[in-house]
Amino acid sequence: MKILFFGIAKDIVGKSIVEFQNEILFPIKVGTLKADLINKYPALGDISSLAIALNSRYATDDMLVSQQDEIAIIPPVSGG
């Protein structure tokens, strides 16, 4: 499974795409996946409102993720 990281999340992880092989048991809830990622990359927990997109739509913590889904980690965005 590939997870896409954007913005500061990409800087924390050190790359824009991370592939996980046999490290995640599916199906998994979005909230559990988020907790697992924060455990692996603790600085992600410092981001005030880390969003997860599931197949190009923002996901809630109770949604289920399968291995075929596209996952994106999106930190808060600011601009002017």
Image (tube, helix red, strand yellow):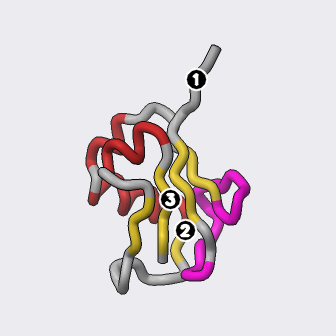
Determine which residue is flagged by label 2.
29
Count of numbered circles in the view = 3
Name which residue lies at 65% across and 62% down.
Answer: 54
Give the Cα separation between the discs numbered 2 and 3. Answer: 17 Å
Q: Amino acid at mark 3?
A: Leu
Q: Position of residue 58 (x, y in %)?
A: 68, 51
Determine which residue is flagged by label 3.
4
- Secondary element under disc 3, as helix, strand or loop, is strand
Residue 1 located within the stretch drawn in magenta: no
Name which residue lies at 55% across and 68% down.
Answer: 29
Q: Residue furthest right?
A: 57
Name which residue lies at 37% across and 58% down.
Answer: 37
Q: Earlier in the sequence, mark 3 or mark 1?
A: 3
Determine which residue is flagged by label 1.
78
Against 62, residue 64 (above or below) is below
Against 45, residue 53 (above or below) is below
Q: Amino acid at mark 2?
A: Lys
Name which residue lies at 52% across and 74% down.
Answer: 28
Give the Cα separation between the discs numbered 3 and 1. Answer: 19 Å
Range shown magenta: 54-68
Give the Cα separation between the discs numbered 1 and 2. Answer: 28 Å
Q: Which mark is residue 15?
A: none
Q: Main secondary structure of the magenta part?
A: loop
